Image (spheres, coloured by chain):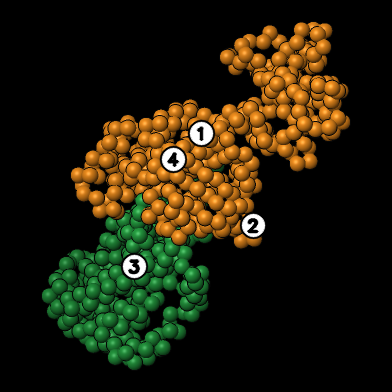
Amino acid sequence: MTSRKLLSEAKLWLVAIPILLWTLIPIYHIFLFSISSKDSAFSGALWPDKPTLRNFGTVFRQENFYLHHFWNQIWNSLWIALAVGAITLAVATCAAFAISRLKVRGGRTVMNAALFTYFIPAAFLAVPMYKAMGAYGLLNSRWSLVLAMVTLASPYAIWVLKQASDKLPWELDEAARIDGATPLQLFRLVYLPLMLPSLVAIGTYAVLLAWNEYLYAFLLLSHENTIPLAVGLGHFLASDDSPWEILMATALIYALPPAAIYYAFRRYMVGGLTSGAVKS
Amino acid sequence: MALVSFSQIEKSFGATKVVHGISLDIADGEFMVLVGPSGCGKSTLLRMLAGLEEIGGGTIAIDGRVVNDVDSKDRNVAMVFQSYALYPHMTVRENMGFSLRLRKESNRVIEERVSQAARILNLEPYLDRYPRELSGGQRQRVAMGRAIVRDPKVFLFDEPLSNLDAKLRVAMRAEIKALHQRLKTTTVYVTHDQVEAMTMADRIAVVNDGRVEQLGTPLELYDRPANLFVAQFIGSPAMNILEGALAKSGDSSCVKALGQRWPVESSGGTDGQPVKYGIRPEHIGFAGRGSGGIAAEVVVVEPMGAQTELVVRVADVSLTVVTHGRANLRPGDGLSLSPEAGHAHVFDPATGRRI
């Protein structure tokens, strides 16, 4: 290896190591808490004296005051995340197809409007969203959070999918048209299969956005039985003497599905997210 | 098989008019090549026929039926694209059968037609492969197969060979021509390559700047180009063009150019009229020394085996000369040229038209 190469490699490591530590230390911290007993949780040791999996059993058997609805809440999280993923995908795919491939009139305006929504921070929209959901009588229904999250996820999803659509060769549409395809057949038989990588990426994005959402969930849902686990976790902090080891065990469980999804679709994620990143 | 008729076709993109009232009739079973430089409007013409581009003005009829407002899929035309446009997620079999599947043909019919087309195009071993697993030439054949299985009224080819290497292009040229002779389907073929046009066409329409410059069989265009554009576009190496003046005396006429007399067959025009004189490289022969030929100096010798191309200089102007067989010449050698009067062309320099 030449010295120049060595130097550039060293620089890379110099950046990579702090980032890695920055990311991994909190995760390790969670892990450490989750395998510690209540007494040793705050000992400050790098590894507990007697590691235990009892905390996980407590969580799964809903044996803690804060966890009486654990299974119910994780089901809510899953239900909401999948619904948001599915609806966002449906909305964004149709929009991207119509704008990019069918060249519908006003497509540009829709794209600009979608971009414009990001000028307003989501937190600002929380109160109007709350009022709107109240007006529709959806408060405390899982649908209120699903609709709110679809609203927040769609603009980005439309934007990315539109950019990805633009990259499909135009001749394919023309060939399909000459072959006798109607727009719907073109959509189903040519467009969707070719967009699959981007669809997986955007679907994953929407699912994770909803899975990780706290603010809106906290605001729109208030009943123990309707809140997702993210809000349920927040309730731990309501008392002065929180069972941190149980909280962390629950948090670790909650963090596993996103990690699994990322791992499974990592190939699509990188390709899909960057494919819409630059206008080419 | 069908008649195709363009009548007063116009097309503009924004403020730019790209097709200026083209009228063109293509006979049943004819192989018509539209040839011209890029941006001349030939592809636009083809795409209007395919229904991929709105017709700006005039009418297009297939078998007497005006198709201006008919959807692509109902025109019964099949198109082969320059980029092949194969569906990447389908196998060769699925690609070729796609149009039949959309027409809800039975599986038996699809299978039959696809395997028949595959047999014609030697694609049988590749039916279960994906386009990405094929070479350029094979992809091109799949694209043609996709067109064949539909048994369309008209085949449309949009520069289908441009993405292939030179050797494959020659082979595919012959394949497409053989295919046409076998199927006898009316074909409209767009290319910018005049060699493709010459070798494949029944008739050629030379398109330039949104107009048809000349329509005729390949040899008609070659032997009697109607204007300077066609003269220079058709033929390789290109025709030599010299500026000069017509000199007529009695029955004989010639063109005075570069201080020499270039013989032409008696033609129209008046004595002293400024003209452009055109002579193809293979129509310049050699005269013996001192026999009154045009003195020239060899600049470059390009031996091709069967023929030899020479670049020669006459009074500081370079001309191309092609001679059959080998030429025992070297750069710097002097020689005497003898252009064939019967094959000389004279054009009006202002209008470019043949005189």
Mark 1 is on which residue type?
Answer: Ala
Horizontal and vertical percent for residue A244? 26, 77
Secondary structure under tag 3 reads helix
Residue A251 sits in which quadrant? bottom left
- How far apart in space, not on screen, are marks 3 and 4 (Cα)? 49 Å
What residue is shown at x 66% (from left), y 20% (from top)? B282
Which is in the foreground here, disc 2 or disc 1? 1
Which residue was labeled with disc 1? Answer: B201
Chain on which label 2 sits: B
Q: Which residue is mark 4?
A: B28
**Residue at horizontal 44 percent and vertical 28 percent from the top:** B174
Residue placed under numbered mark 2 in the picture? B16
Say which chain tag 1 marks: B
Residue found 50% across the figure and 48% down from its top: B5
The earlier-in-sequence mark between 2 and 4 is 2
Q: Is residue B272 visible?
A: yes
N-terminal-most mark, 1 or 4: 4
Q: Is residue B338 left or right of residue B149?
A: right
Q: Which residue is mark 3?
A: A89
Task: Identify the hue of chain A.
Answer: green
- Number of residues whose C-alpha sits closer than 10 Å to that of mark 1, classed few (under 14), some (14–19) or many (20 or more): many
**Tags 2 and 1 both on a single chain:** yes
In this view, A71 is above or below A136? above
Looking at the image, tell me whether mark 2 or mark 1 is earlier in sequence order: 2
Question: Mark 4 falls on what kind of element?
Answer: loop
Crowding at dot 4, Cα within 10 Å, few <14 / some 14-19 / many 20+, comes out as some
